[in-house]
Amino acid sequence: MVLCVILLIGYIVQIVAIYALFLGVGDKKMNFKIDIDEKESECSCRKYKLVFTSSSADVTQYLSWKDLEDLIDEATAVRGYKEIMEKFQCKIDDAREIKKKIDRDSCCRKCDLKMKECYRCCRVCESPLEQDLLKALVRNGIDVELQLRINKDNTISHFPEPVDPSKILTVPDFYLETKEKKICVYTDGHSYHERTEYQAVRDRSIDRDLQNLGYVVLRYTTSEIRQKLVDTVRDIKKTMGLATENIVMEESNCEIYF
């Protein structure tokens, strides 16, 4: 129990200002410190002392373990994390980054996939190119897996399972599967002419190994995704054996605030 409290201190530091406002103590420039001590109450239930110190007043509160849990629950709700954590079954660190992204980026606030693909878009995709392609594929009804781990012996594991460097063959940006095909999609981030000799040889080696294992490999450059996203989605659907008419794209004017 004591260890759990110690681990919670770092998080409580982040939410203590909110709690102090609930108590009517703090102001915008409030300074505070936390002192957590165990104390046996009359009912033999452990209590934890939280001391809030500001320029205008000091407040001491004795909280039970349930009180601490309720405090965390209330604070995550106030800061907008609880809804995200429950929706995506993610940790508070993930929820914090997703909330930050939504708050600062008007594209996220306007996105038709808001609170549907936020976790994969913000926390699994590793580049803006991947984010753009993910949203385009989802809007067109394509079921896709991100960051599949494909090992040299053709065994697989899934994000967020750790990658074993001694076994891994590749981690494609996207993996799609039909009854007849297993498709690996890469967003290369460079044109074919911009690749170094090492990158070209490495990519060809991976592609050859994947093909020998029965995979189809598709690679798209920055310009193909940025400038020809409709064609990219159409090409993927064609490879999957799906109809290529009526590609759905979102058009919006977005401003990003840093």
Image (cartoon, grey):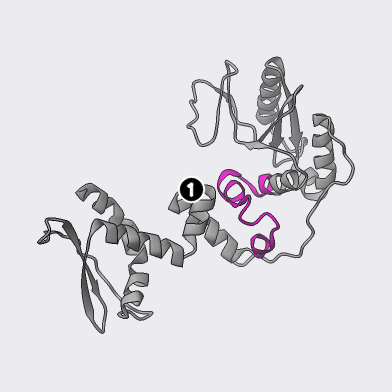
Task: Specify whether residue 136 is painted magenta.
Answer: no
Residue 229 in the image: state x and y as whole percent.
80, 46
Indicate the position of residue 57 as horizontal and vertical percent values: 23, 82
- Identify which amino acid the numbered label 1 is placed on: Cys
The structure residue drawn at horizontal position 36% and vertical position 65%, both measured from the top left corner, is 15
Can you say whether 137 is above or below 10 in the image? above
Q: Give me the residue at 35% from left, 79% from top.
A: 29
Relative depth, front residue between 174 and 19: 19
Q: Is residue 69 left or right of residue 42?
A: right
Question: Mark 1 — residue?
Answer: 90
What's the magenta bit mostly, secondary-structure-wise?
helix
Q: Quadrant of residue 201?
A: top right
Question: How would you rate the neighbour count of disc 1 (Cα within 10 Å): few for under 14, some for 14-19, many for 20 or more?
Answer: some
State the quadrant of the C terminus.
Answer: bottom right
Instruction: Name which quarter of the figure residue 212 lies in.
Output: top right
x 12%, y 61%: residue: 41
Task: Measuring from the top left, give residue 186's x and y in whole percent.
Answer: 69, 35
Q: Is residue 240 left or right of residue 1?
A: right
Q: Is residue 121 magenta?
A: yes
Q: Which residues are magenta?
A: 106-131
Name the quadrant containing residue 107: bottom right
Please tell me whether mark 1 sits on a helix, a strand or a loop: loop
